[in-house]
């Protein structure tokens, strides 16, 4: 449903962020769990070399022998540069025993509620005309 709403101009994922705990439910490449972008978009060449693209963070950390993860060694140039950046990027990540969770994006107003999300969705999907809706009292609401 989130993908369908995104195609209609409503990106609900900008309202929340993944909070890393034990790393068992967050996808290493696909989810935004460090920074503001997926690792797949930050390091596309290394993503293409990975033989386990759908693994979770817990299975990629702590950094281990990358030759068991990558189909082949980085060949130089941009691949080596991205590989070194990725290794530096994840060296400082520490997992804990808490489960992964969701949190509100910091730049969202504190009044963020389910109701405000409904208003956001309604404002994009429901047609608004110049005239107010006329109700007929003789017809039941439901």
Image (spheres, rainbow, N blue to C red):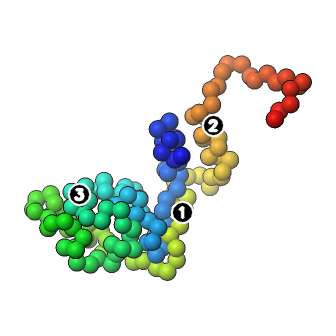
- What percent of the width, then of the height, locates residue 40? 31, 57
Where does label 2 land, which residue?
Answer: 122
Q: Nearer the viewer, mark 1 or mark 3?
A: 3
5 to the left or right of 75? right
Q: Residue at x 9, y 62 (%)?
A: 76
Depth check, mark 2 against mark 3: the one in front is: 3
Quadrant of the rendered image containing residue 60: bottom left
Quarter of the figure with residue 84: bottom left
Local crowd at mark 3 within 10 Å, few (<14), some, or many (≥20)? Answer: few
In 3D space, how far apart are the residues under numbered discs 1 and 3 (Cα atoms)?
Answer: 28 Å
Q: Is residue 39 above or below residue 14?
A: below
From this viewpoint, is residue 85 visible? Answer: no
Looking at the image, can residue 29 be seen?
yes
Residue at x 60%, y 41% (from the top left corner) = 120
Mark drawn on residue 84: none
Q: Quadrant of residue 135?
A: top right
Q: Secondary structure at mark 1?
A: strand
Q: Which residue is tagged 3?
A: 48
1 or 3: tag closer to the N-terminus: 3
Figure check: 139 above or below 18: above
- Marks 1/2: CA–CA distance: 23 Å
Q: Is residue 136 above or below residue 57?
A: above
Total marks in image: 3
Left-right relation of 102 to 37: right
* Residue under the image location 49 percent in, 51 percent down: 13
The residue drawn where x is 65% and y is 43% is: 118
Task: Find residue 34 and report its horizontal and vertical position in percent.
Answer: 39, 64
Q: Which residue is mark 1?
A: 102
Q: Earlier in the sequence, mark 2 or mark 3?
A: 3
């Amino acid at each position: 449903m989130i993908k369908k709403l995104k195609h209609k101009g409503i990106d609900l994922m900008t309202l929340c962020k993944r909070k890393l705990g034990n790393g068992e439910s967050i996808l290493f490449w696909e989810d935004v769990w460090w920074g503001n972008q997926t690792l797949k978009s930050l390091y596309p060449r290394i993503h293409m070399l990975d033989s386990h693209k759908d693994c979770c963070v817990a299975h990629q950390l702590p950094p281990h022998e990358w030759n068991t993860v990558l189909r082949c060694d980085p060949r130089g140039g941009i691949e080596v540069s991205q590989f070194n950046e990725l290794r530096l990027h994840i060296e400082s990540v520490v997992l804990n025993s808490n489960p992964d969770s969701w949190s509100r994006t910091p730049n969202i107003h504190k009044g963020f509620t389910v109701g405000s999300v409904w208003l956001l969705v309604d404002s994009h999907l429901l047609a608004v005309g110049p005239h107010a809706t006329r109700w007929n009292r003789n017809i039941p609401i439901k």
